[in-house]
Amino acid sequence: MFFRLFFFLVVFVALIAWIAQLNPGTVQIALPGDYVQEASKISVMLGSAVFGSLVVLLGLSVKATGEYFHNWKSSRNRQKDYKVQSLYSKGLNALLSRRFDVAAANFEKALALKPNHADSLLRLGNIYYKDGDYAEAIKLHQRARNVDEENIEVLFALAMDYEDSRRTEDALQSLEDLLEKDEGNLRALTRIRDIHQRMGEFEKAEEAQQRVLKLNMPAKDKEAEQQRLMGLRYETGRVMLEAGNLDKAKRLFKSLVKMDKDFVPAYLGLGEVHLEEGESAEAASLWEEAYKATGSIIFLHRLEDLYLKLGAPAKIINVYKTALLRNPKDSNLNFFLGKLYFRLEMVDDAFETLSSIDSSNRQFTDLHKLLANLYMRRGSCQDAISEFKKALAYSDQHIVPYRCGNCDYFSTDWSGRCPRCGKWNSYDIDLDKYC
């Protein structure tokens, strides 16, 4: 190594000497202040070479120093990011274990090191949301959104914050912003629909449901969503009916009948439109046809009230009798016909019809009450007492209950939509099983 260095040094000196011999003489170098300095040509050449080398060396030194500081800073940032991620992971594990205080503490430590850590902002905001501190949750989720505007989860969390803090318009706007980034987001669309439905804005809820139905989904889910669309359209029709917009209500109810011949609420709504228009005969005719199409006794109840109001009891009696010709053993029909006879003071007909019903295997409270009253009117006190005892023996008493076929909810008032499970067209009557 030393010999090689010595060799290059000798060669360099010899080269300098040879160049100096080829370039004899001096040159004048002008300096500031009219000062002139003479120097040999070889000195100028060597000075220029040394100066250039120093400039290059300085540049390399600056670059090396910059790279050193850059690597040092990157190393510090990596260590910082690693610590932030470690704290976030600990917080997430605590969150999954439902140790919310520990989770919040770790997320806060992570944010102290990195205030714009979107995931920590999101999770910490969710903890405040769970605790009901919607104002703080909104602040954290807004910060997370500013950091990561494309984060769908942040937008949905912010919508939930707004919704539960009763800032409904802001909630809807957040969900629409989400849909601009992910137009097929089912969760956002159903949330928009549910918000409008809860606010009674059924037309807007129906529009959102139309968007839901455009998405690809299994056939079973598609059918359920189609039923929900019909329910929302029915509610829109009810709103139009109550507002006096009869033409639009009629169009909506008719469209529902075309969509589903078994959708009972649509027939009832359409009949009510006819009544509001003073067309009682059209309403009665519609409900008679609806009963034949659906078999729902609810139409017989409406017809009973309508015909009695019109002073035409014979017509509703005839409707019941016609129905019984097709199903003579139907205890529901017999019970309601007997109840109608009782209502009309047709004691003998009522007794004949009601006494023909077999109640040996069920708790038929109302039947026994009616029979007891009929026995009293016929002067058979002992029989009346016996029937009253039978009625009193049953703890579960229902007065013509409407039952939801989806969740078994009972009510004495009919509704197009079950208040418990929210399903439309689910109310019916089954005295054989539930009375």
Image: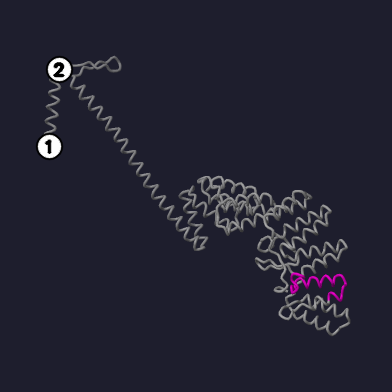
What residue is shown with label 1?
Answer: 4
Q: Residue at 52%, 60% (x, y): give it.
A: 101
Query: Which quadrant: the C terminus?
Result: bottom right
Q: How many labels does the image show?
A: 2
When the figure is inspected, residue 295 is found, relative to residue 376, above or below; the finding is above
- Which disc, if any, is residue 380? none
Q: Residues within 10 Å of mark 2 (few under 14, many from 20)?
A: few
What residue is shown with label 2?
Answer: 24
Residue 304, percent from left and from top: 81, 65
Q: How crowded is mark 1: few (under 14 residues within 10 Å), some or many (20 or more)?
A: few
Toward the viewer: 253 or 158?
A: 253
Residue 188 horizontal side relative to residue 281, left or right: left
Residue type (three-letter) at the residue carrying disc 2: Pro
Residue 91, percent from left and from top: 48, 58
Q: How far apart are marks 1 and 2 (CA)?
A: 31 Å
First in residue order: circle 1 vs circle 2? 1
Residue 410 horizontal side relative to residue 320, left or right: left
Under circle 1, the secondary element is: helix
